[in-house]
Amino acid sequence: LNIDGKRRNLKNRKYCLKCSPFGSKNTRILDPETRIAKGLTITDCTCSDCGRKYTYRREGKSKSRCNSCYTKRARATARTRAYAYKGSMCLVCGYDRCMENLHFHHVCPEDKLFDVGSNINLSWQRVRDELDKCVILCSIHHTELHVGLIDTQHVLNLENIRKQTTKWEHSSDGRTSG
């Protein structure tokens, strides 16, 4: 069959071209009786975090959170774990009141594989390897470092002092023990 000037094989199609036009990538089972026979359910849910109504399409399962809230919570947990791994405070001044004002700074930008903040949802091993190349700075000192008011060597010296004087050992799962 020729569709849009191209020869197409429709041998394996489950739906007619009217129900599922070519190229629409329709893989849902449209017939309600077939859905019930295969045990597929569509559940209308309300998110317990934000109150948003959403449709959950899984086999015999239900969720209490929408995907947005689930992802938001998972990212927050991973971010807290990353900050705890690096000490949860600015290396220069010790600021630790608001985590959103703390930034991961790559000491050697040429060794940087990815931005930690926006890729916090990668595997812990990859994030931890990248965190080992970073220091935590508050927003003020991070800006001052990039402008040139603070010397990179000074930050490296502070990091080395922190490593020598801190008696915390980091385990493989990112938790600290004294």
Image (spheres, grey):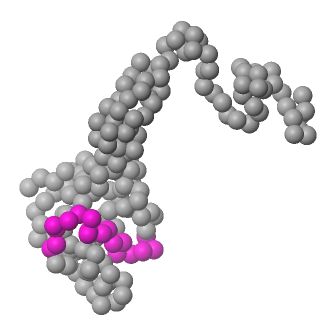
Q: Quadrant of the C terminus?
A: bottom left
97 or 79, nearer to the observer = 97
Pick out the residue farthest to the bottom: 149
Q: Residue at x 59, y 12 (%)?
A: 34
Residue 147, horizontal then vertical, whole percent: 36, 87
43 or 100, nearer to the observer = 43
Q: Is residue 125 magenta?
A: no
- Does residue 3 appear in the picture of this structure? yes
Magenta region, residue range: 94-111
The quarter holding residue 59 reads top left
- Does residue 85 appear in the picture of this structure? no
Horizontal arrangement in the rendering, residue 113 relative to residue 138 (left or right): right
Residue 129, horizontal then vertical, whole percent: 35, 58
On screen, residue 147 above or below 119: below
The quarter holding residue 100 reads bottom left
75 or 157, nearer to the observer = 75
The quarter holding residue 119 reads bottom left
Q: Quadrant of the N terminus?
A: top right
Residue 106, horizontal then vertical, whole percent: 36, 72
Residue 61, horizontal then vertical, whole percent: 39, 22
Q: Residue at x 29, y 41 (%)?
A: 49
Pick out the residue farthest to the left: 178
Q: Residue at x 32, y 32 (%)?
A: 64
